[in-house]
Image (cartoon, rainbow, N blue to C red):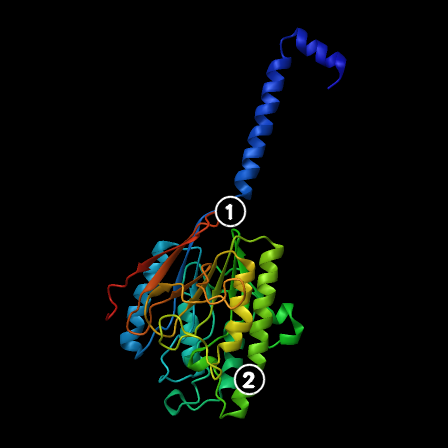
Amino acid sequence: MSHRLNARLHRLGLLSLLTACLGGLLGATGAVADEAAAPRRFEFIALGDMPYGPAETAYPVYQQLIRQINAQAPAFSLHVGDFKSGSSPCSDQEFAHQRDFFNQFDSALVYTPGDNEWTDCHRPAAGGYSPQERLDMLRDMFFGAPRSLGRQPLAVQRQSDLQPAHARFRENLRFERDGVLFLTLNVPGSNNGFEPRDLAAVQEFLARSEANLAWLQAGFERARSQDVRALVIAMQADPFLGANQWMDFPSHSGFTRLFEQGLLPLVQDWGRPVLLIHGDSHRFVIDRPFKAVKEPGKGQVLRNLLRLQVFGEQEVHAVQVSVDPASPDPFAFKPLFNPLSPH
């Protein structure tokens, strides 16, 4: 402001008023900017291992749960795989039915595959399919574009688009929401698909293991570069094979390298909250069962790694996850019980 204009405003008694208005405007603008920059609380739904059983009995119960989820209006939902039982056919028709169910979710539905959809499809009751062929069909039907399913799909990043060395792995996804990074991994039950008696299965497992480790590493690099507040990882398999806690991974486990060389040291080094969501054992569990693998603190509880195991099979319920990105303990959980569920 010029000296001459300043003097005129002062004589008219307007200088103090103008200064106050400008200060208020700048203060309000700063407050709006701070509010816009602050991460907002949000909620999402986690579910998996459903629907199981004959269509005439299983589908109405599952549709009731979908209606309940839609009534909650979550930001999105995560289905952690096994969208059918292991003894039902792995047919294209069944895949299409389940894709139709996913598209009944009013918001976005993010999905990661389970063993019942591909690794176990060699079973006679499941149709005697080639597991790799079924996985390729899942990739075509569910991961053909960089977006989720659901009526309001969200944009996702696929490993196949970001890492050319792992171009087959369209099913490994990531996206961000209000300072939280979400990451999915193709880690199915039945020992992560590791079957040493089958050469083709071993070759598939080794390639997928390398892809999952690369995707995990890239996820934590992204978390650091974007200064995210927390990280959520979703997969299908229960890595403890029925044990609740304090299990060391044996050499024959299909999870040893993924956890001991991948997830656990990455979580320990990063230090911020991580939530691992999985299904497979069909019981609702929240705990901290993992131990640090590096010094200092090796063998102690890895406090920043929380596990959520979702309902499933006959327990056709879901879990509502509330996220407060600004909190040092950002995750809270509430079961969403289905009145039509058998258990």
Q: Residue furthest front?
A: 296
Q: Are marks 1 and 2 in contact (CB under 8 Å)?
A: no
- Residue 167 falls in which quadrant of the image? bottom right
- Residue 2 falls in which quadrant of the image? top right
Where is residue 122 shown, x and y percent of the image?
A: 44, 89
- Three-letter residue code for mark 1: Pro
User: Residue at horizontal 32%, vertical 64%?
Assistant: 65
Where is residue 16 shown, x and y percent of the image?
A: 61, 14
In the image, residue 303 above or below residue 121: above
Q: Looking at the figure, which quarter contains the C terminus?
A: bottom left
Q: Looking at the figure, which quarter contains the N terminus?
A: top right
In the image, residue 67 above or below residue 247: above
Badge 2, how many Cα within 10 Å: few under 14, some, many 20+? some
**60 left or right, relative to 272:** left
- Three-letter residue code for mark 2: Glu
Badge 1, how many Cα within 10 Å: few under 14, some, many 20+? some
User: Residue at horizontal 57%, vertical 25%?
Assistant: 24
Q: Give how far apart the Cα atoms at labels 1 and 2 are.
A: 40 Å
**83 left or right, relative to 147:** left
Where is residue 311 shown, x and y percent of the image?
A: 33, 68
- For label 1, the residue is 39
User: Residue at horizontal 53%, vertical 62%?
Assistant: 296
Q: Secondary structure at mark 1?
A: loop
Which residue is nearer to you in this view: 43 or 193? 193
Q: Secondary structure at mark 2?
A: helix
**220 left or right, relative to 130:** right
- For label 2, the residue is 204
**208 left or right, relative to 285:** right
